Image (tube, rainbow, N blue to C red):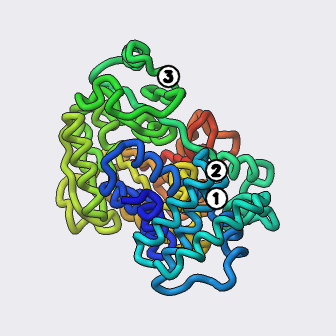
Amino acid sequence: MNIRALAAKAVFDVLERGISLSAALPEQQTKVSNSKDKGLLAEICYGVMRHLPQLDKQVSDCLSKPIKGKQRIIHQLLLVGCYQLYFTRIPAHAAISETVEACRLLGFENLVKVVNGVLRTIQRNQASLPEDNDTLKFNMPGWIVKSLKAAYPDQWQEIIEQSQMRPPMWLRSNAQKQSRDEYLNALAHAQITASAGCAPQSILLDSPADVGLLPGFFEGLVSVQDGAAQWAATLLEPKDNELILDACAAPGGKTCHILELTPKASLVAVDFDDKRLKRVNENLIRLNHQAEVIHGDATDIDSWWQGDKFDRILLDAPCSATGVIRRHPDIKWLRKAKDIEELAALQSKILDHCWQWLKPGGTLLYATCSIMPAENCDQINAFLARTANATLDVLPQSNAGETGWQILPGQQQMDGFYYARLRKQG
């Protein structure tokens, strides 16, 4: 199948149907057998998402009238063609001819001349990409730029620049199998260059590698997990023989990390998304861990749990994911400004309900992969104000006067993340 046609389908699914790229892309990759072609398909799709406003402006300026209705996928195909001309080393003639052929394969013979004409005009002009406003300059929705300027007046530009970069690849060494230093030695023997990160089991690769090349990956020696996400299990401070709840657990990276630190803990992993729970089970099987995996709602624990209250709860709350845009650039176009308020209300509801299920003297770690204060420090300050028996632990990593610990994208090469550790008074 033509790679450009598949890319157009994936981009169409994201922009027109609101499907995440992490769901849309693998569906199209199943139609490609060659790993190199799968890589090119991913490169194009992620690239279009990173540079969407600029690409869209270039394409739209070359069209005599907008492409609408059932033909809309051809507009996405033109974005795919434009990305190749500006950001890849593919020869222009090959990029154009393959994209024109994709138009035929998608069943729009009547638009072949339009696709050819637009791409040749873009190639001929090779104009600088537009930077007429913040959205075009930063390839970021205006509402996100405005929010970041307000929240981080001295850092907003650096945050945006980091969010545009390609993410590094982080590993988590399995503490049950070997020390981090031992696994670093194994990587060195495999000629994979890496270094220790700031989280206790974290390892940063100099360049991404196929998991099949990682020593002992399929035997559970190591997992792929961003350095910031690895702080969750560490900051939770789990102990053996405790009853622990991992609320909103999918896809299971933090679940498995908790069990690597405390293999004798009784862990309950729950998530509202039944499909994503499959990933939790897959990770548990690969790493040979045991947990009680439940399809349930974290705002209604009573409906699926009749056991004791929990010693510790990890609440990795549903959020805007604005801290992981570099890893999921489609977030920029799937999220809307109104989502922040709605998500904050949901987080508040889950937090209050989970608190009822925490034992006196217990610990709740609140986490998001957001950088929006409404979902993070404002959320926790509001919770502390209304919850008499809650106290905040001052994390050693946090800045003076800061509620919780806000990690910004690119800080020590990690994703954007937020943590607040709460203790329940007896």
- Residue 124 as seen in the image, left or right of residue 269: right
Of label 1 and label 3, which has the lower sequence position? 1
Answer above or below: position of 402 versus 340: above
Question: Label 3 sits on what residue type?
Answer: Ala
* Gap in angstroms between the C-alphas marked 2 and 1: 10 Å
Residue drawn at point x = 52 percent, y = 68 percent: 77
Q: Which residue is mark 1?
A: 51
Q: Residues within 10 Å of mark 2 (few under 14, many from 20)?
A: few
Image-quadrant location for residue 411: top right
Q: Report the residue at 47% width, 60% height from top.
A: 4
Rendered image: mark on residue 87: 2
Asked whether disc 2 touches disc 1, contact meaning CB atoms under 8 Å apart, the reply is yes
User: Cβ–Cβ below 8 Å for labels 3 and 2?
Assistant: no
The local secondary structure at tag 1 comes to loop
Q: Earlier in the sequence, mark 2 or mark 1?
A: 1
Report the side of 5 relative to 395 (left or right): left
Calculate the distance from the C-alpha at mark 3 to the C-alpha at mark 2: 28 Å
Res. 186 visible in picture: yes
Callout 3: 10 Å neighbours few (<14), some, many (20+)?
Answer: some
**Residue depicted at x 20% and y 60%:** 305
Is the residue marked by circle 1 packed among few (<14), some (14-19), or many (20+) residues within 10 Å?
many
Residue 194 - label: 3
Residue 43 in picture, x, y percent from top left? 51, 50
Q: Amino acid at mark 2?
A: Phe
What distance separates the C-alpha of mark 1 from that of mark 3?
30 Å
